[in-house]
Image: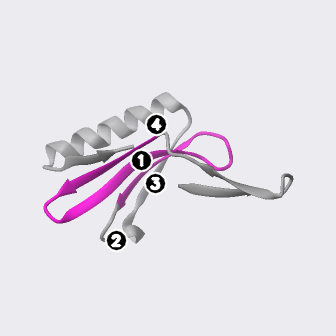
Amino acid sequence: MATHWDPTAGHTFEHAPVVRWIFARGNDALTCEVDPRSEGAGYDVCVVPHWDVRAAVVERANTTLAALRRHAEIARALREAGWSVARRF
């Protein structure tokens, strides 16, 4: 979840992901999620392997529909590769 400080308001607020799925295969887990961009324009589609978060992949999407379509494509590919959805948010 991204946290953003708003200097005009003097406080922080959190951006909840549009969708977040955690996938599992064997002892491995990864997260695939769609987050609103903190700059307010578009979305980040993120795939984060829990065993190496530095290997995360982030793609930008300009619209909600494009971001959700990309999430669905990634989820389908992961399921075809033997991953299963462990949790949905």
Q: Position of residue 1 (x, y in %)?
A: 53, 55
Q: CA distance from mark 2 to mark 3?
A: 14 Å
Q: Amino acid at mark 4?
A: Ala
Left or right: 74 as drawn, with respect to 34: left
**Mark 1, residue position:** 33
Tell me the magenta residue range.
19-48
Q: CA distance from mark 3 to mark 4?
A: 11 Å
Vertical placement of 18 versus 57: above or below? above
Q: Tell me the SS state at disc 1.
A: strand
**Mark 2, residue position:** 52
Q: Amino acid at mark 1?
A: Glu
**Mark 4, residue position:** 67
Vertical placement of 78 versus 24: above or below? above
Is residue 54 something that shows in the picture?
yes
Q: Residue at x 52, y 31 (%)?
A: 64
Instruction: Pick the residue in front: 12 or 49.
Output: 12
